Image: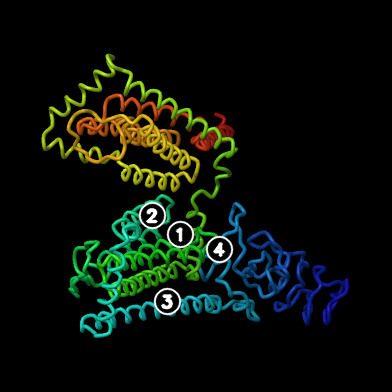
Amino acid sequence: MTDDTDGRLDTDGRVDGGACVDGGARPDRDGRLDGSARSDGGARSDGGARSDGGARSDGGARSDGGAGTDRDGRVDGDARTHGDGHAHGDGHADSDSRTDRGGDPRADDARPYGKGRPSGDRGLGGDASPDRHGRRDGDQVEARPLEHFTARSLAGLAAVVAAGIAFGVLLALVRFRFGPLYDLDHGVAASVNGYVAGHEGLLGLIRFVTGIGGPLKVWVVVLAVAVLLIRRRFRLAVFLVVAGLGALALDPTIKLLVGRLRPVVDVPVAHAPGNSFPSGHALGSFVVYGALLLVFLPAVPKRWRPVAITGVATLVLLIGVSRIALGVHFVSDVLAGWLLGAAWLGATLYAFRLWRREDGRRAPKITEGLEPEAAGDLQPAPDERAVLPHPWVETAEVLVGWVLVLGALFGFGMYASYHADGTLLATLDTAVPRWFAEHRNPTLDGWSHWASKAGDTHTILAVSLVFCTLVLARWRQWRPILFLTLVMVGELTLFLASAAAVNRPRPDVPHLDQNLPTSSFPSGHIAATICLWTTIALIVLARTDRWWRWLTVVAAVVMPLIVTTSRFYRGMHHPSDLLGAILLTALWVGLLYVVVKPNAEAAASHADDDLQHQDRGVRRLARHPS
């Protein structure tokens, strides 16, 4: 083997260790490489010891050969690997490509900066090369990440300050009744009210949009926090709670301090209590939906993130405009709500980034979300292979089954309604509603009203959405969600179709509920309640052995009894309507359970757990045969 450039042969005519040495490195009189020499990539130094060029990196890749060796030819222990899987000549880390124990790529966000960190922030490579003694400057290692953090933080802080100043200026203009702003506010309120008041369909849409910015957002935050706690993302849960509580505190406080009255329009189409400045809907929607976007943005694929950001911005804009259209806020109220929301959300975001910095984590770009490394924990069902094995086959089976269940309901409904005279069923249909009507009193009237609400459309929908979200957060499977969705959609359509076909009159007693759009058979309240709580019990029982699983069974029995009693008491249904609801539930839920198999993944998971438990037992027995 020949030597490089100025390299010299030792007394035996070999380069020490069989290695080629590059530029200017010469063996000393003992045949060892000088401490400042670098071995050529992947060759062996003195004694066959492998240089950093042949050392394994964190990800298992070999280096390119630039890590410095000491006087004895050993690799400098501080050499760092590059993100492409190889260590480069400067001995620094790139940041984009390490693998965890399972071989999955992980962002380096979750690893601390500074000493012991395998990789720095993006842009770190090349800044902390070893000096001639092989040492590294720790301050240089953190210089670029600190620069990035400072630049981004200062830009964000400037935006927060700008929003706060703009809000203060607008507040001053409102307080001193600045003429142009006063004319703009009242002119827009009058003209928009004159247009909206004559379009009832548009009013319904506006009320729906404004409802999204109302108390609903509080429940959305509560549900999101529950999901984050289940997924063990406590830091993100704290961020949501702080942002939401701050918005709740700012709105009434500033309204009380300013004391501005709401607009007075010719044709009032909505009513809102309290003062006008700023708009609580605009403030709350900006903070809540903006915070939710920042938290869950890492779970959105990169190509869809602009769509998500645009969607949230559009929603916040529409909520603010809806308050002006309903005549309950001036334009300046809505602008103030947005500015104050931007200032508060920016302040909480800035504090969160400082919190990350204290833990040694990088400050990501705003388009990456709050914690890019949490993407795996925020995805709904990352490990589920397929929701249904043969979706077209299952779809055909469900449609055919729906028609058959409708036929069974129609047959029983026609018999119970028009052909059961003289039977025990007809006697009960007459006697039971009359007995309840004879035992009414004001206290029971009020109780039955709220008990009946447990089976109405809004309650059923709310419980379904909450349960689906929690199931997805806990077990990360779409199939039970699909099962519950099909159950409830099928129940609604079967109820509407059979009620229209049978067209049975309500019981011949005074009705406490008026102007119901459907007929008596079957009971929609009872059918929805039985379907919902039975489905919840079926899903939960197969997925946990905790004691609280039996609470779902209790709910599946108690909730239908409460709703049934209230519907009988209020004179809205016959006993045979209850039988129709039970028939609908048994046939429809049974059909979907067989076709969809909602607990197939749960059964496979339990089988894997059993095998792992047995394997651990065998290994334990092998270690301790006695």
10 Å neighbourhood of mark 4: few (<14), some, or many (≥20)?
few
Q: Kindly indicate whether the residue at mark 2 contacts the one at mark 1 (C-beta within 8 angstroms).
A: yes
| Label 3 vs 2, first from the N-terminus | 3
User: At label 1, which amino acid type do we have?
Assistant: Phe
Residue located beneath label 4 in the image: 302
Residue located beneath label 2 in the image: 224
Name the one closer to the observer, 517 or 37: 517
Residue located beneath label 1 in the image: 296
Measured Cα–Cα span from mark 3 to mark 2: 25 Å
Q: Kindly indicate whether the residue at mark 3 contacts the one at mark 4 (C-beta within 8 angstroms).
A: no
Question: Where residue 296 sits in the image (x, y, percent)?
Answer: 45, 59
Query: Residue at 42% of width from left, 70% of height from top?
Result: 353
10 Å neighbourhood of mark 3: few (<14), some, or many (≥20)?
some
Q: How many marks?
A: 4
| Label 4 vs 2, first from the N-terminus | 2
Measured Cα–Cα span from mark 1 to mark 4: 12 Å
- Say what secondary structure mark 3 lies in: helix
Question: Where residue 487 sits in the image (x, y, percent)?
Answer: 43, 37
Measured Cα–Cα span from mark 4 to mark 2: 22 Å
| Label 1 vs 4, first from the N-terminus | 1
Q: Kindly indicate whether the residue at mark 1 contacts the one at mark 3 (C-beta within 8 angstroms).
A: no
- Say what secondary structure mark 4 lies in: helix
Name the one closer to the observer, 538 or 184: 184
Name the one closer to the observer, 589 or 189: 189
